[in-house]
């Protein structure tokens, strides 16, 4: 197809237009553009970022400078660090989704249906982006500078983007990238783009202890299945939580900065940095469970027998618990409470004993999973050529985004990132954002154990925005999808929006594509006021059940082989007796319920 007038107008864009057919893509797709764009780093001519962009409407990306000045555009970033954003494009929110048999299907909830959308591989070296051998980022500030350089060049290719409202969105470790990129944009005189909102899903805004460890007890209250509904085990974890100081009491409004919490690495030598937490997102761990290949060959009957065996072992453990430290921190795990919880589940609790504890999606204990792997498509030479991608093997996670800064280096976090977590400057960032009318959106999937919602609520209560610290009222307003189904909780104050999605794991648009699409339309791109605090009134009302700290998880845990899954349905009596136990167990522990005005 010829786009003659536009080609004349935009010679640079013509180079990037994807015109050759893509393998396995059988239906027409939105006009799209792809390729590498330099980051303008002095002395590093080969440093580029790679993008793949899809139009909302025919010709919408290539209109001229100053046109369509009210029409939004967005960038999506995956995390890692080192995760290619094509993972998001092809398994979460893009127009082409890869299926279990490696064919490609359309996504009716693709984010480019609401705005011109760019999926960008960054930092340099990630995905199809490129770097000189000595050109990797040495800090998040460098990463932010590179991104601004990329944007400066991108708007030369697509001139309308310079002034149209820009939405920077992403997930997971992009909770670190996005604040730093935003800071770099705020620090640039005459920035190349018109930033309006930033949106972070299941993000690492706080430090490691805050996003990974602090929420453990809340996670157990959401999914008591993890400990087989055992009250003694629950009390044990609560005690450990208290000893670590992770039982932070949130108040609405919050009074005073929340002090830095215990770094688990200072409490035990069990884990070196590199042994904890595989990168986010990791492929399903191919460690001990694959080697023994437990899950794959077991029939349901075997699983049932196994369940009996596990019950016996669990009874043993309960006796073991009595011998465990009482009133002192467990010497093995220290404050690695998330690791202790997941080990516990895999040691003792059916079906995790035969499945896998999916850190990103608690009710998913399937093993092995149906693959969700874009690498075959992306490494096909026809795809690469059509997408103007470099001759380079595409991998989901690039292992060394910080160059020689390894996971074990002193002064780095477990990912080799030498920069301080964004929590340290979020108040300054929010102050800058207020001055520029930039809104901040933070959302969570309720089934994510790894970057769970409690940690992000602590983050929000620890930020001063619009002149006041934290939210003044507890999030408790429901929002719905287009079918009117409950999707989760939304709350908005002083240009900061928080949402908690029901039935969603770490990858919210993958778990609940429709709800994520509605959220993008209404709350990220739109200005829907549901959940907005307006004086003493909250738009959409407040529901006292939603004001609890815990939104109960689903009652089915899925296990077995991905293609022949079974589910373990928790009987309602079990849930009821657990609820009545919790009603007494937590009455004193979380006195944060009542709004104080
Ligand atoms: C940039 O890439 C070219 C082509 O691969 C290579 O010849 C050149 O040495 C690279 N430059 C630097 C600074 O690494
Ligand atoms: C990493 O180390 C290698 C070998 O020591 C060196 O050649 C390279 O320049 C280093 N890269 C960076 C980013 O420092
Ligand atoms: C805030 O903006 C100022 C420039 O006005 C800039 O120097 C500073 O780095 C910015 N900080 C953050 C965290 O955005
Ligand atoms: C939270 O409140 C409980 C009950 O008053 C208290 O035991 C606990 O120490 C508090 N947590 C912190 C971190 O101060
Ligand atoms: C709260 O924010 C301050 C910076 O204002 C930071 O030093 C502190 O570590 C934060 N607290 C937590 C629990 O992250
Ligand atoms: C821990 O100690 C308390 C009092 O010292 C006792 O009541 C409780 O039974 C002990 N718990 C365990 C699991 O040993
Ligand atoms: C799980 O089992 C391993 C191996 O027996 C043991 O070392 C570890 O302490 C157990 N962890 C928990 C939390 O039960
Ligand atoms: C295309 O899809 C088929 C399954 O229909 C799969 O076997 C093949 O690997 C895919 N090829 C590419 C290049 O994605
Ligand atoms: C794909 O392209 C690379 C680089 O040109 C070449 O080495 C490789 O053989 C090609 N693979 C196939 C399957 O054609
Ligand atoms: C919120 O943003 C709007 C612009 O969208 C601005 O007019 C208003 O002052 C901001 N409010 C706060 C508290 O920052
Ligand atoms: C705001 O979003 C909700 C979705 O939860 C929707 O039901 C409602 O109609 C929207 N309000 C407006 C004014 O569009």
Image: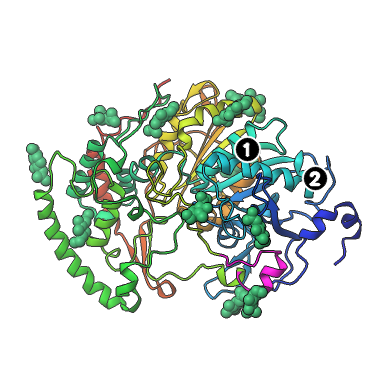
Secondary structure, mark 1, is strand
Residue topped by disc 1: 197
The Cα atoms of the two marked residues, 1 and 2, are separated by 20 Å
Q: Residue 458: x and y, percent?
A: 40, 34
**Along the horizontal axis of the image, is 13 left or right of 447?**
right
Answer with mark 1 or mark 2, whichever residue precedes in sequence.
Answer: 2
- The residue at the point 88 percent across, 55 percent down is 6
In the rendered structure, which segment of residues is drawn in magenta? 379-394
| Chief secondary structure of the magenta portion | loop
| The stretch drawn in magenta includes residue 380 | yes
Question: In what quadrant does ligand 9 lie?
Answer: bottom right
Q: Position of residue 367 (x, y in %)?
A: 37, 69
Residue 159's mark? 2
Quick check: is 13 in the magenta stretch?
no
Counting from the top left corner in percent of width and height, residue 278 is at 39, 56
Specify whether 335 is left or right of 535.
Answer: left
In this orientation, does residue 402 appear? no
């Amino acid at each position: 197809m010829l786009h003659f007038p536009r080609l004349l107008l935009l010679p640079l864009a013509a180079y990037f237009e994807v015109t050759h057919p893509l393998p396995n893509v059988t239906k027409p797709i939105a006009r799209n553009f792809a390729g590498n764009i330099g980051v303008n780093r002095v002395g590093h001519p080969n440093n580029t970022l790679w993008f793949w962009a899809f139009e909302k409407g025919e010709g919408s990306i290539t209109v001229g400078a100053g046109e369509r000045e009210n029409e939004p555009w967005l960038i999506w970033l995956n995390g890692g660090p080192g995760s290619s954003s094509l993972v998001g494009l092809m398994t979460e929110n893009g127009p082409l989704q890869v299926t279990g048999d490696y064919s490609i299907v359309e996504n009716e909830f693709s984010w480019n249906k609401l705005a011109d959308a760019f999926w960008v591989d960054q930092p340099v070296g990630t995905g199809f982006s490129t770097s000189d051998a000595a050109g990797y980022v040495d800090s998040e500030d460098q990463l932010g500078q590179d991104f601004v350089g990329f944007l400066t060049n991108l708007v030369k290719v697509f001139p309308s983007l310079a002034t149209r409202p820009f939405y920077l969105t992403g997930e997971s470790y992009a909770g670190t990238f996005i604040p730093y990129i935003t800071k770099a944009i705020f620090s640039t005189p005459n920035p190349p783009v018109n930033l309006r909102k930033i949106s972070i899903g299941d993000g690492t805004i706080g430090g490691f202890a805050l996003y990974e460890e602090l929420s453990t007890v809340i996670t157990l209250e959401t999914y008591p299945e993890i400990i087989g509904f055992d009250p003694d085990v629950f009390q044990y974890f609560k005690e450990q939580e208290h000893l670590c100081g992770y039982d932070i009491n949130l108040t609405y409004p919050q009074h005073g900065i929340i002090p830095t919490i215990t770094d688990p690495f200072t409490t035990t030598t069990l884990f070196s940095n590199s042994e904890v937490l595989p990168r986010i997102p990791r492929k399903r761990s191919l460690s001990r469970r694959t080697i023994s290949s437990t899950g794959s060959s077991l029939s349901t009957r075997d699983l049932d027998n196994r369940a009996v065996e596990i019950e016996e072992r669990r009874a043993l453990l309960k006796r073991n618990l009595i011998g465990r430290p009482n009133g002192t921190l467990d010497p093995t795990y220290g404050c690695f409470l998330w690791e202790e919880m997941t080990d516990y589940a895999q040691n003792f609790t059916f079906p995790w004993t035969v499945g896998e504890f999916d850190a990103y999606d608690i009710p998913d204990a399937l093993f092995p999973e149906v693959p969700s792997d874009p690498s075959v498509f992306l490494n096909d030479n026809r795809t690469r050529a059509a997408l103007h991608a470099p001759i380079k093997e595409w991998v989901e996670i690039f292992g060394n985004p910080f160059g020689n800064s390894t996971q074990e280096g002193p002064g780095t976090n477990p990912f080799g990132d030498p920069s301080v977590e964004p929590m340290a400057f979020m108040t300054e960032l929010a102050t800058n954002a207020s001055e520029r009318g930039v809104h901040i959106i933070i959302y969570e999937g309720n089934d994510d154990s790894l970057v769970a919602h409690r940690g992000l609520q602590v983050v929000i209560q620890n930020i001063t925005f619009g002149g006041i610290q934290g939210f003044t009222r507890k999030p408790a307003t429901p929002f719905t999808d287009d079918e009117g189904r409950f999707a989760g909780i939304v709350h908005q104050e002083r240009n900061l929006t928080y949402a908690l999605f029901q039935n969603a794991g770490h990858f919210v648009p993958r778990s609940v594509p429709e709800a994520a699409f509605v959220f993008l339309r209404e709350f990220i791109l739109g200005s829907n006021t549901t959940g907005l605090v307006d004086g003493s009134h909250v738009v959409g009302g407040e529901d006292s059940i939603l004001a609890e700290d815990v939104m109960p998880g689903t009652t089915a845990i899925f296990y077995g082989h991905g293609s022949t899954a079974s589910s373990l349905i928790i009987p309602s009596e079990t849930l009821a007796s657990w609820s009545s136990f919790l009603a007494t167990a937590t009455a004193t522990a979380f006195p944060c319920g009542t709004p104080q005005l």
